[in-house]
Image (spheres, helix red, strand yellow):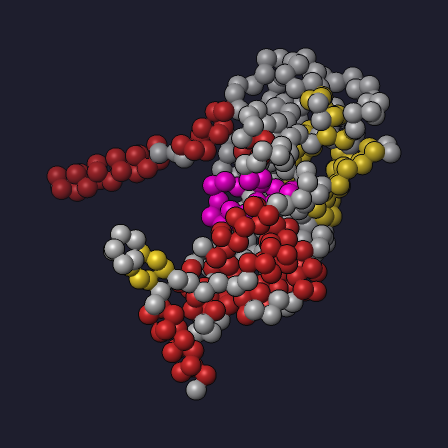
Amino acid sequence: MRQLFFIVLVSSLVLAGIGACGDPVYDAQIKSLGDEQANVPQGEFHRAGQPCELCHSSSGPASASPFTVAGTIFAQQASAIGVDGVTVAMTDTTGSSFVTKTNCVGNFFVRPGQWDPAFPILARIVRDNRSRTMQGQIGRERSCANCHKDPFSSYERLSSVGHVYLYSPDDVVPTPPTCPVNPRVGGGN
Amino acid sequence: MRCFISALTLLLVLGCASSPSPDGTTRTTTILAPSQSDFSQFVSPVLERRCGTLDCHGQVGRPLRLYSARGLRLPNDGGLIPGTGGTTQEEQTANYRAVIGLEPEELTRVMAGVDPPRALLLLKKPLTLEGHKGGPAIAPTNDPVELCLDSWIVGTIDQATCTKAAAFPP
């Protein structure tokens, strides 16, 4: 009887230990995103410009709301203001296409029930008479911001293409619509 | 007879493959590798386009690291960043070394005709004959990428097929 108790005790401790061990790299990636911005509630407008899929995946903290592809479209290269109503058109390797639009902070997201693409995929963004086509294919990354991040050092500039933007420096950027939160990254509401 | 010649070639190659220097301080390994100039001109553009995106092999931490004009850039003094200029000669050379350095001994056996090209990780991975985190990247049959790589490995580069494989979208 004591032997059985000992086996159950050890097994429980081992299972508890396994359960307590997360993925430190993954945990650090999520932690690096920082806290939620003050006055911007969790929802479709939060964390513009961040890698959505990091949390919105089957193993992430937002696993109840997973995305297959997601990102943020900004106005210009030097302007981190999200653009509303941009059409994001994507085609996967089987020829299946999906079109969605950005909300007023520039965020867009695709849920598994809407479209679950077979990578690689091609992407194009359009609004009014302006469009940009991605120069390369998306190999397997579901978050735009994992590659399209704003580089901070000369070394990081070797591997990042900066945030996704629609307009050239000379273009007149449309006035942002009324939005529950400020579409400028870090702008709060 | 062909097998015998291939085996003999391999024995000769591998027999001389690793030899110490006269003073015994260094050991040199000789491998067989396909043409570097053909690689730079025809094969590197294929791998850059199909495998070297920033979310796949265009990453510093990824095995078979690939540099390209639209992906990861080799540190440079010219201010080249992703999306600017063309792929430089230094980047093509780095890509060549990444490819031939992946499995130099197996590549030597393939070059000697002992093993088929599909024995190489370079093909096994994208064909998912072996686990590939990026999933299938080459069609099981008649994919221009595989035909291009095959032609490069056997020394008769198929320029038209390689150009087709490097085109975007494929």
Q: Position of residue B80 (x, y in %)?
A: 63, 36
Q: Nearer the viewer, residue B14 or A55?
A: B14
Residue sitting nearer the eye, A118 or A43: A118
For the question of whether residue B36 can be seen, the reply is yes
Q: Residue A80, located in which quarter of the rendered image?
A: top right
Q: Quadrant of the C terminus of chain A?
A: top right
Q: Residue furthest right?
A: A129
The residue sitting at the left extreme is A2
Residue plotted at (49% across, 28% down): A30
Measured along the vertical axis of the image, is residue A34 above or below residue B166? above
A165 with respect to A21 (left or right): right
Of residue A162 and residue A30, the one placed in the foreground of this image is: A162
The reply to whether the magenta stretch includes residue B90 is: no
Quadrant in which residue A37 is drawn? top right
Q: Is residue A8 left or right of residue A172?
A: left
Residue B64 magenta: yes
Residue A106 screen position, x and y as percent: 71, 27
Q: Position of residue B36 (x, y in %)?
A: 55, 58
Q: In the image, is A45 to the left or to the right of B3?
A: right
Write the residue at 51% across / 68% down.
Answer: B117
Could you tell me if residue A43 is visible in this image?
Answer: no
Q: Residue at x 83, y 33 (%)?
A: A130
> Where B56 sits versus A51, above or below?
below
| Quadrant in which residue A187 is drawn | top right
Q: Position of residue A66 (x, y in %)?
A: 58, 37
The extreme bottom residue here reads B1
Q: Left or right? Give the position of A188 relative to A17.
A: right
Q: Bounds of the magenta span?
A: B59-74
Which quadrant of the rendered structure holds the N terminus of chain A? top left
Q: Residue at x 75, y 18 (%)?
A: A179
